[in-house]
Image (spheres, grey):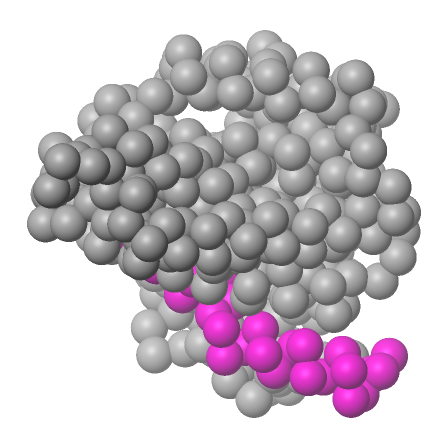
Amino acid sequence: MDLEFNDEQHLLRETVRRVCAEHASLDVVRKMEDDPTGFPAAFWKQLAETGITGLLIPESHGGAGMSFLDAAIVYEEFGRSLAPSPHFASAVLGAGVLLAAGGDALQRSWLPRIASGEAILTPAWIEPDGGFGPRGVQLRAEQARLGADAANGDFVLRGIKRHVPFASAATRLLVLARTGPEDDAIDLFLVDPQAPGVTLTQQRSLASDTQYELRLDDVRVPAAARIGDAGSGWTTWNRVLLDGVVLLAALAMGGAERALEITVQYAKDREQFDKPLGAFQAIAHYLADAATAVDGGKMLVYEAAWARAEGRSTARLAPMAKLFACQTWRDVTAMCQQVWGGVGFTLEYDIQLYFRRAKQLQITWWDAKLLEERIASAILDGDQPFRSGS
């Protein structure tokens, strides 16, 4: 494993850090909390102009064609700044699904627009009382039986999704829908959020990010909007999300590192009993232990990203990276809150921004229970496909 970053990767890190500082500072993060759109247009424009929106899209489709290790560097910087954007939903998951299963027509139509930032795709996956497994997808997609749509093989979608990120700003919703009784009889559809029968209701979250409840009431979707072969949706989604959690782990480690940095500085500046807080041994030990955990988590994330970039299996490394990184971010920010004392929980201070987002990420995009199941399956079942009980 070679983790010696080259000059281009150092420049990439510097570029993303500068763009985040100029267009997605923590003041901007505060303004975007519970905002209906959820991200600053100026920041999204800058990501497009620097090629970050096309990060993992091949050059043949208008993207930058960077490696997965490059992407981990970008997401580490996103985590440090808590940058609000639909990049993960659109440029990672949306583009990833199209690259993995989309036909030539869909790829030609959407990938260049995603790469340029013109189009935003966002996944609609989680359902009320569902889970992270295939049985949690109960929204139905049935072929139309009456009218011209029936002859064309078009579909009618009905059901509810929740926690759909940035849905009001999306060009298309990437909807997972059940098409048969088998556990994995699931397809992926591109749904126009302006189509008749689509209702969006904004939800509140721990991180105050922008999420929506999506209701589909007999929404007509053309057959050409189905991505991939019939019944292949869950396999595609599972494969793409396995890649995605590596980048979320990188985001978590960037957030943990930055939270620790500002807390160490506070421990140096804040005096109690005529000496800095950091001079007290108990606090120094907390900070030292956190630094060790952050360094270990970053190495694990880099290993997973490197393995993915080299075409190696990440069935074990990817869930390990997210499990450890999210737990570390949660633990580090909880400790940081204690160092800051009572003011750390107030909205005027920045550390609470990291604390709330750490917990939010820990329970979304596969929680600890499912990640542990996946790790155990990768160790015990070898090459057998993972099947969740939830």
Query: In the rendered image, which quarter is residue 313 located in?
Result: bottom right
Q: Is residue 319 visible?
A: yes
- Asked if 383 appears above or below 13 in the picture, the reply is below
* Residue 373 x, y percent position in the rendering: 61, 82
Q: Quadrant of residue 359?
A: bottom left
Task: Name the residue rendered at 30%, 33% in the picture.
Answer: 268
Compared to 332, does 134 lie above or below? below
Residue plotted at (42% across, 30% down): 81
Frontmost residue, 16 versus 163: 16
User: Does residue 308 belong to the magenta stretch?
Assistant: no
Residue at screen point 52% across, 20% down: 17
Position of 312 relative to 134 (above/below):
above
- The answer to whether residue 82 of the structure is visible from this angle is no
Question: Residue drawn 28% across and 38% down?
Answer: 267
Left or right of 95: which side holds 163? left
Magenta stretch encompasses residue 366? yes
Q: Specify start and end residues of the magenta stretch as a single range.
A: 355-384
Viewer-proximal residue among 150 and 198: 198
Q: Residue furthest front?
A: 274
Taken as a whole, is the magenta stretch helix, strand or loop? helix
